Image (spheres, grey):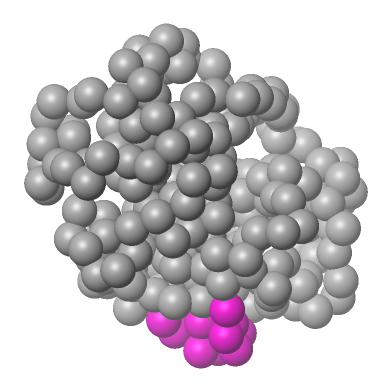
């Protein structure tokens, strides 16, 4: 698996160290073991997890600016992209949030096993956690969930500082940028770049949309739990 991992990283142009590889492989082992009794990911084979979770997460790596100090990953699930990026960026403090306790329990185990002092694990919904002095306190946000962009924006943007960036990962071009125009306007943000990638082995397409927050977000966002999904901006 180490050779597959290094090969993939070489293809996407991400630098690594032996320690980072060791940590990723230990993370892989923990994920596979935990997944035997608790469903964290539908993928069961090592090769798919390495390419479609690890390498996929690291497509973000070369888009991170050097001055980033704080990051939030909302709906992190089994830790993608948050744990993977935290392994590669020890100088960035990550908040990994998920509302499902069985997932955050696993992430806490990974944090302790890999000694990831730059990671905070939170079991909460974004709508609840933001009231805990977290509004507009992060440099960058991630969300690898399946919700549409106009929904995800309402969860992420209020956490970002003015000038902060949201890197939205999509499986392929969906045209969601057009649907999200109203949400972007309301949340005082704009799309500044769209990056097209492909995974190194399967050649599956990936799109990363870079969104920058331009002005302070109205404090009524995000709306209460469930509303952003039912009635997107």
Give percent across and percent down for residue 171: 53, 28
Residue under the image location 61 percent in, 25 percent down: 192
Give percent across and percent down for residue 120: 44, 77
Q: Is residue 144 magenta?
A: no
Give percent across and percent down for residue 116: 58, 82
Up-down relation of residue 118 to residue 165 (above or below): below
Can residue 92 be seen? yes
Can residue 30 be seen? no
- The secondary structure making up most of the magenta span is helix
Up-down relation of residue 98 to residue 111 (above or below): above
Up-down relation of residue 192 to residue 134 (above or below): above
> How many numbered marks does the figure carry?
0
In the image: residue 215, left or right of residue 60: left
In the image: residue 181, left or right of residue 226: right
Magenta-highlighted residues? 108-118
Residue under the image location 75 percent in, 63 percent down: 1
Up-down relation of residue 163 to residue 192 (above or below): below
Res 26 → quadrant: bottom right
Image quadrant where one finds the C terminus = top left
In the image: residue 197, left or right of residue 16: left
Residue at the far front in the pictured view: 215
Residue under the image location 54 percent in, 35 percent down: 212
Residue under the image location 45 percent in, 30 percent down: 189
Q: Is residue 110 magenta?
A: yes
Res 92 → quadrant: bottom right
Give percent across and percent down for residue 13: 87, 45
């Amino acid at each position: 698996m180490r050779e597959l991992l290094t090969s993939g990283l070489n293809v996407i142009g991400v630098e690594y160290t032996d320690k980072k590889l060791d940590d990723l492989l230990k993370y892989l082992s923990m994920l596979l073991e935990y997944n035997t009794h608790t469903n964290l990911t539908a993928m069961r084979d090592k090769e798919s997890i390495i390419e479609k979770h690890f390498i996929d997460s690291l497509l973000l790596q070369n888009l991170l600016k050097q001055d980033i100090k704080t990051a939030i990953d909302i709906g992190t699930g089994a830790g993608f992209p948050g744990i993977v990026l935290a392994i590669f960026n020890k100088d960035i403090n990550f908040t990994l949030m998920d509302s499902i306790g069985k997932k955050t329990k696993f992430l806490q185990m990974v944090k302790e096993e890999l000694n990831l002092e730059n990671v905070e694990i939170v079991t909460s919904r974004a709508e609840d956690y933001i009231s805990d002095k977290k509004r507009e306190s992060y440099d960058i946000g991630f969300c690898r969930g399946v919700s549409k962009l106009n929904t995800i924006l309402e969860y992420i943007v209020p956490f970002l500082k003015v000038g902060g960036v949201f890197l939205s990962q999509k499986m392929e071009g969906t045209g969601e940028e057009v649907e999200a125009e109203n949400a972007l306007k309301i949340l005082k943000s704009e799309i500044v770049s769209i990056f097209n990638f492909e995974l190194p082995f399967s050649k599956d397409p990936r799109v990363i949309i870079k969104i920058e927050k331009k002005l302070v977000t109205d404090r009524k966002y995000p709306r209460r739990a469930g509303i952003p999904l039912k009635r997107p901006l």
